[in-house]
Image (tube, helix red, strand yellow):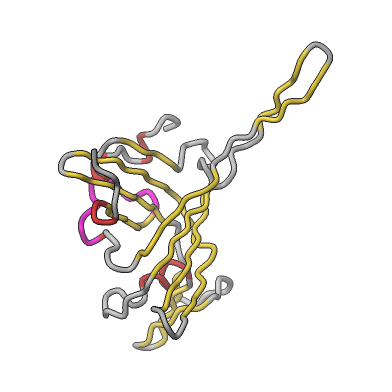
Amino acid sequence: MVAISRSKVNIYIVAADTDMSSLNATDIFKGDIKSYSASGGEKDVESDPVFGGYVDKEKPITQVELGFEIVPLIDADKASRWDELAYTTETIGAKTVYTMSTDNLSSTAVAPTARMVVIEAVNGTDYTTVAYNNCNVTVLDLEHNADDNRTYNMTMKFSPTTDDGVSNFMSGKLAATALPNWSQLNNN
């Protein structure tokens, strides 16, 4: 029996609806994710007492929230990847900056898009993978204490299903690249 440890986990963060079979090693976020957590997705049923028994009222499934604690790297190819997930990318001449602008964007500005997050645990040929689709960054908090590394706390949220009722969550005892694509799920 082997526990899921940090050395056995791959975390992919790519564009929403990415073809699962196209995930590759360059999509794995290595070196700067310190911890992750998921919460939400509860389906609450409220029982209302009536004469002769109860009437159950099903409430919608709650939104899911993913949380990441990140130690950002300053490497040339990784220094801005968290800003790119959370903020609008704006190019002015040869300079690229990240802003909180979302309205009336210039022709060179690109607003952040929804993402797919896949967390794969692997031990030899044994896998367990969980995938989340259509995730949007809602918070990217910065903290830097003098006696520690600079950290980000990033929160992503997503609805349990798309507008068409297709799940934005799946898990399985499969490698990330072996999971079905979102378009293959039950309501498609």
Q: Of 54 and 183, which appears nearest the observer?
A: 54
Q: Residue at x 52, y 72 (%)?
A: 141
Q: Which residue is outermost to the right? A: 51
Q: State yes or no: residue 19 in magenta.
A: yes
Residue 78 lies in what quarter of the image? bottom left
Q: State yes or no: residue 5 in magenta.
A: no
Q: Locate residue 157, reporting x and y percent.
A: 52, 54
Vertical side of 86 occupied by 120: above or below: above
Residue 75 lies in what quarter of the image? bottom left
- Side (left or right) of 59 relative to 145: right
- Side (left or right) of 98 relative to 79: right
- Side (left or right) of 58 relative to 176: right
Q: Locate residue 178, reporting x and y percent.
A: 24, 40
In the picture, the quarter occupied by the N terminus is top left
Q: Residue at x 46, y 38 (%)?
A: 167
Q: Which residue is outermost to the left? A: 124
Q: Locate residue 116, reporting x and y percent.
A: 39, 52
Vertical side of 176 occupied by 88: above or below: below
Q: Residue at x 59, y 38 (%)?
A: 61
Q: Residue at x 21, y 55 (%)?
A: 24
Q: Of 134 and 35, which appears nearest the observer?
A: 35
The count of marks equals 0
State the extent of the magenta-drawn residues as a range: 16-26
In the picture, the quarter occupied by the C terminus is top left
Q: Locate residue 124, reporting x and y percent.
A: 15, 43
- Side (left or right) of 99 relative to 48: left
